[in-house]
Image (cartoon, grey):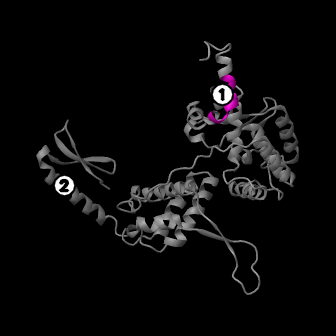
Amino acid sequence: MPRKIWFRKSKGAWYTQFGRQQVKLAEGFDNKTEAQQAFNQLLAEDVQRLPRAHKLTVADICKAFLDHARGQLAPNTVDWYERFLGQFTRTFGCCIASRLKVANVSQWLEAQKRVPVGRAPKGQRRPYRVLKWSSSTRHSVVNCLRSTFNRAVRKRLLLNNPLADLERPAMESRDHLLAPEDRRAILTSVKDREFRIFLYALANTGARPGEIASVTAAHVDLTEGIWRLTKHKTAKRTGKPRTIVLIDPMKKLTARLMREHPEGPLFVNTKGQAFTCNAIRCRIRNIRERLGLGKKVVAYCYRHTFITEALARGVPVAKVAAVVGHTTYRMIEKHYDHLSQKYDDLRQAIVTAVSPPLGQTA
């Protein structure tokens, strides 16, 4: 579908992009009106090729996107899309997609999700706890909606994206660090062996939670002391496997888990099933509420803490990036500035730099 017109100086004519072709509309810079009329004619012809565009509902658009996603994306990613698009469809599914209003969707993003807490006394209303989507969650949901409706435009299901102007909240920084006492308290509070093992692996590999949850015996090379994952977050971008290097205690743990689970995931829950992203999130949330820890305590904190402590102890940035699977060290420099909070380390660096102290005090 043509979206706009522009003047190409090298050709001395007005053009527009129509599908994979660039169409000349009119010659001469002064003939913009004629070019606009030709553009409008193309647009009208395109509308005629979309007889169902005015009938498609939001549910139709979301279903088309999910059908595409199931054949192209990883299962965890598809589950994530299904979760939020399912909630979106329950509210707006019957709406005509082309008539969807940004204001209404913005109100939906700000809506509160109420979860019942405990049992209410007989004859009284059940108490509720109000949980709000974080800014990061709303940011991700807006990305999800943009992807869904942009694809509908590319596939000529819609003439334009009705949510193109939907504002995207800023992402919250996930730079919370876990102090050693917090990590010990969390580990002590977990009663089942399975999740304790999972947390131990988080703390001692620097791997992403999803990476640990996906490890099977087929991914292990005990001779080299590594896990080698072919499916991972950056696989499409890098075209390379993700290699997770194991220290000796992790190699021993991995060998034991391979004997227990020769097939399927090594890290499983009490039912023998792989940990899902949502299950991990819920377990950490329950632990932090029970221990009175802040809301910023999530599973990813183990990875952030691992990286920060490695940098604080003098491990070169490039090596840290290689260990945690970042494609370049620039990701470390951009997102892991936690050392500014490690004043003792910085103070020691200054002492080393100026020892003995230069000059005299005033």
Q: Is residue 274 visible?
A: yes
The quadrant of the rendering that contains the C terminus is top right
Examine the image and state in which quarter residue 217 appears.
top right
Mark 1 crowd level (few <14, some 14–19, many ≥20, 10 Å Cα): some
Task: Give the residues drawn in magenta, as a range.
Answer: 340-349
Which percent across, then down, holds residue 121?
Answer: 77, 82
Write the residue at 19% across / 37% down. Answer: 9
Tag 2: amino acid: Gln
Tell me if residue 250 comes above or below residue 58 in the rendering. above
Marks 1,2: beta carbons within 8 A: no
Residue at the extreme front of the image, as rendered? 362
Q: Which mark is residue 36?
A: 2
Q: Which mark is residue 346?
A: 1
Which percent across, then down, holds residue 227?
Answer: 74, 37
Which percent across, then down, holds residue 170?
Answer: 51, 51
- Residue in the foreground of this view, choosing between 231 and 58: 58
Mark 2 crowd level (few <14, some 14–19, many ≥20, 10 Å Cα): some
- Residue in the foreground of this view, choosing between 93 and 299: 299
The quadrant of the rendering that contains the N terminus is bottom left
Count of numbered circles on the image: 2
